[in-house]
Amino acid sequence: MARRKLVNISFIVEDDFTAPFTVNGYTFHPQAPAQRQGAINVTTASQILRDNRRNIQNAYVEYIGPQRSSVIFRSGRVGANPQNSRERKILEDLLVLGSVLTAHNWQLFSYKRYVQYPIVSRNHLEYISRDSNQCREHMETATACLLDQNWQRQFRNGFHLPMLLNHANILNAESRFLSMVVLWEWLYPHLHNPQGATPNDESNDLREIFYFILNYFWPNQVNVSLRTSNIFHVLRNQLAHSGKLPINRGYADQWMTQLQWDRTTTARGINEYLKFFDRLTQVAVLKTLGIHGEQSLAAFNFPQQLQTFLSTGKI
């Protein structure tokens, strides 16, 4: 039996990860931190911030026999040079899934000397899997998609999953938003043509891209006005072409031009729209894996914001 150390395996409550769970032949084990007898653990805000930055080796994974090749990183290799590189395995696919589901950058401890090793432990996604049992269920659902040849053909072996994870590790909110828009541009042709996207399936019209994808995942709920007027289309152009806020595009609706960075007494702030878009993108990507994560974000009022946005264009 092989054993590999893992870093950043985390759920909302540490106590939720108390027993091993198995996905696709890989058994993930928690590695409980040593505690002083009789001590009471108090977690401070500074400690949470510090832990969100530090990569902590806190678990290990066991498996038996040879590993199956990676789907997401098909034909990819890891190593310092071709002489000592090795093929990437499906375990790395599971770590990508875990990272997207738990907002932490799951990684092999042994990769700390490679470029694949994360800079920080926490990314800018949100918890979808609340505990290890729900994570196992989500990962099983997602793995069934990864191993389906039709799914592989439609979504290019899941290229959008590491794309989402890479973008979620961008620290600057405006830059992260612009990169997330690129992901929507990628999703559009691959949803539009399940047989395998071609350049003919692509579109340069962001408003049509947003409307199509929203209507694809939430049919009969999207106000037709979003086809011609979408805050995220305007924000993308504002940041890409002007690089500063607030919005001053002449074609923007008046309410968009009145938005400030922070919330005012009459309107949400632009920063709230950018955060909503992060969550919306995460949910859309997970839907391609058969995972519907809207309700998992109820603590952030995401389901209500989503319904308001689909019907009015605002949150």
Image (tube, rainbow, N blue to C red):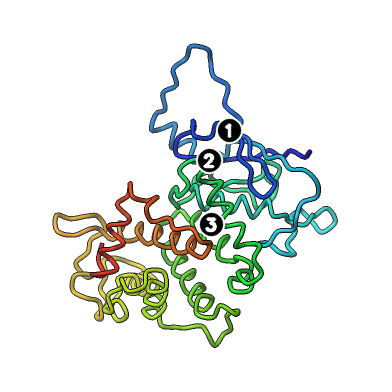
Check disc 1 and report its element: helix, strand or loop.
loop
Sequence-first disc among 2 and 1: 1
| Residue at image mark 2 | 132
Task: Pick the residue in front: 84 or 74.
Answer: 74
Check disc 2 and report its element: helix, strand or loop.
helix
**Which residue shows up at 67% across the image and 44% down it?**
108
The x and y percentages for residue 205 are 41, 82
Say what amino acid the circle numbered 3 marks: Leu
Task: Pick the residue in front: 171 or 154.
Answer: 154
Q: CA distance from mark 3 to mark 2?
A: 20 Å
Toward the left, the furthest residue is 265
**Contact, CB < 8 Å: mark 2 with mark 1?**
yes
Toward the bottom, the furthest residue is 200
Q: Residues within 10 Å of mark 3 (few under 14, many from 20)?
A: many
Image position of 186 (left or right of 89): left
| Residue at image mark 3 | 165
Q: Which is closer to the viewer, label 3 or label 1?
A: 1
Res 88 label:
none
**Contact, CB < 8 Å: mark 3 with mark 2?**
no
**Which residue shows up at 28% across the image and 79% down it?**
224
The x and y percentages for residue 110 are 71, 42
| Residue at image mark 1 | 19
Say what amino acid the circle numbered 1 marks: Ala
The x and y percentages for residue 141 are 56, 56
Image position of 81 (left or right of 54): right
**Which residue shows up at 64% across the image and 67% down it?**
157
Q: Residues within 10 Å of mark 2 (few under 14, many from 20)?
A: many
